[in-house]
Amino acid sequence: MTVRSSGTHAIHIEQDVVLARQLARKLATECGIRLIDLTKLVTAVSELARNTMVYGGGGDMDWQIIDENPRTGLRLTFRDEGPGIPDLKLAMTDGWTSGSGLGLGLTGAKRLVDDFEIDTAPGKGTRVTITRWT
Amino acid sequence: MAALQSSTLDAMKKNQNQLLVEWISGLEAGGATRNIKEQDLKQQTSQFLQLIISGLENGNGKNVATSSWDDIRQFLEKLSHSRAQLGQDSQQTASFIFALKGPLFALLQNQYQDSPALLAEQLWEVSELLDALGLHTIRTFQKSREAVIKRQQEELLELSTPVVKLWDGVLALPMIGTLDSQRTQVVMESLLQRIVDTGSEIAIIDITGVPTVDTLVAQHLLKTVTAIRLMGADCIISGVRPQIAQTIVHLGLDLQGVVTKANLADALKLALTRLGMTISKAN
Amino acid sequence: MERIPILQMGPFLLVTIQVDMHDQLALTLQDDLSERISKTSARGVLIDISALDMVDSFIGRMIGTISGLSKIMDAQTVLVGMQPAVAITLVELGLTLPGVSTALNVERGMKLLQDRVIEQ
């Protein structure tokens, strides 16, 4: 497994969420991810980037293109130093929300990608890593 | 554990050409070179030997997964890939590496004929390295083949479940055989695309030819129906056999108001009626 | 400020979303639409998303809100032109936009609105 390329994108204002989506789309296309999977990934990125900005108080999106012959993957990590999620199990059930949203962010995003990992605790910020493979 | 002696490395460097000649003739004798162009084989063997020698010179250990062996791993991955394309099996591909053992051992026997202990040690070092590389090649080969098979399966899927235009605005998707998760997905995606391309308002999914439906497939069907409606078209499911109807009830699945018809003909009649058409006999 | 244009076509309003919207732009559209519906006493709103290659939960919520808003103001909303990849993703997300009517394209959507308005 080798990391072909990597980078990071800061998420602090609304426009950064849009840019995050566009960057994810560009990278996914580079990997050769098919249209439907790509659309799902970009949508997940939109949800998670928005979470980072709105609930995390801003943060970063790290990306990596990974070659694991014969497949290629795009891995994205959303991290923030925000308040963290107090009850992760509850947050991962459909319909939970902490704001005025529909609360589909996390569980929804999980269904849209191949691999999903989350690391969070009150006061410790949040880190979500998603991966889509070809 | 002892390491490769510099004398071994020197011997290899000095006798490259001979090693290559013996290696290639070993490969040919084993039948591993069918369909492979002579120049390609020459280039591949010499490149591999070079990579091994430079790797050993750099003092790389026997752990071929480390980044210091990146070059040789990449070379082997490319080799595996190209052999898979030629339809070769993993035995023939791995023998590319293992066939180097013979000439190398002969070289070492010559080099260390006066020190059997050292000979044994060096033979072991060389053997372990080549084994590790050979295993890596087999592993990568398997993955390549699996990818090829997967792609062929997908193409077969698309071919075997065509979307048919029954009338202006009415598409039909006859599904035949057992449905698995992956097949259902691929097929549904092409149906949705055809709906957009043709501007058809009604899609009939006919499952007459499907013997059983499990929860997963039923869920996919329902997801497809929902997607079709989001796009602004509608869906009729036809050919629901009694067994399938029972399964659906047993699984407690809510068809969410999807109309079902016993057969494709009834579904077509309904579709045409919905589109505001009537059929009458010509005089 | 950037705004999404709203076209008036007789008793109906047509919105064609062609840009990758940031959240504020979506909220502005919501406000602009409710104002226009009220001002023109529009009977229907057509939202054309055929150019959108992604719809996330925020935009989905916006569409649901617009549909609800219009209904209160006696107008019907029809969403048209959703791309297959978007539809599949929304279903996977669990966003089914209940109460929002849909049509394949602007032409069909217009017809749907006309039929509905006549019914009333």
Image (spheres, coloured by chain):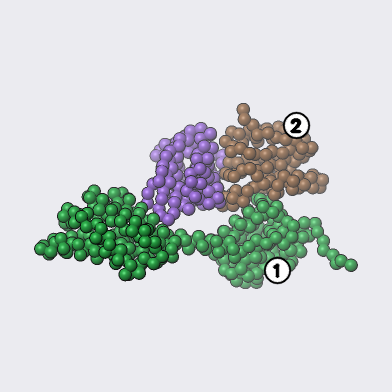
Chain colours: A purple, B green, C brown
Of the residues tagged 2 and 1, which is closer to the observer?
A: 1
Q: Quadrant of residue B49?
A: bottom left
Q: Chain of mark 2?
A: C
**Looking at the image, which residue sits at the far right?**
B283
Q: Above or below — where is B172 with respect to B66?
A: below
What residue lies at 49% left-to-right and 36% top-to-bottom?
A53
Q: Above or below — where is B195 with respect to A26?
A: below
Q: Above or below — where is B16 with respect to A77?
A: below
What residue lies at 50% left-to-right and 60% top-to-bottom?
B151
Say what secondary structure mark 2 lies in. helix
Towards the viewer: A79 or C47: C47
The amino acid at mark 1 is: Asn
Q: Is residue A51 left or right of residue C60?
A: left
Q: How many marks?
A: 2
Question: Residue B283, image x and y in percent?
Answer: 89, 67
Label 1 belongs to which residue? B263
The amino acid at mark 2 is: Lys
Residue B87: in sight, yes or no? Answer: yes
Towards the viewer: A122 or B187: B187
Q: Quadrant of residue A79?
A: top left
Question: Residue B66, image x and y in percent?
Answer: 29, 51
- Can you say which quadrant of the picture contains the N terminus of chain B? bottom left
**Looking at the image, which residue sits at the far top?**
C1
Towards the viewer: B202 or C102: B202
Callout 1 environment at 10 Å: few (<14), some (14 to 19), or many (20+)? some
Residue A127: in sight, yes or no? Answer: no
Q: Chain of mark 1?
A: B
State how far apart marks 2 and 1 are (Cα). Answer: 51 Å
Towards the viewer: A52 or A92: A52
Label 2 belongs to which residue? C39
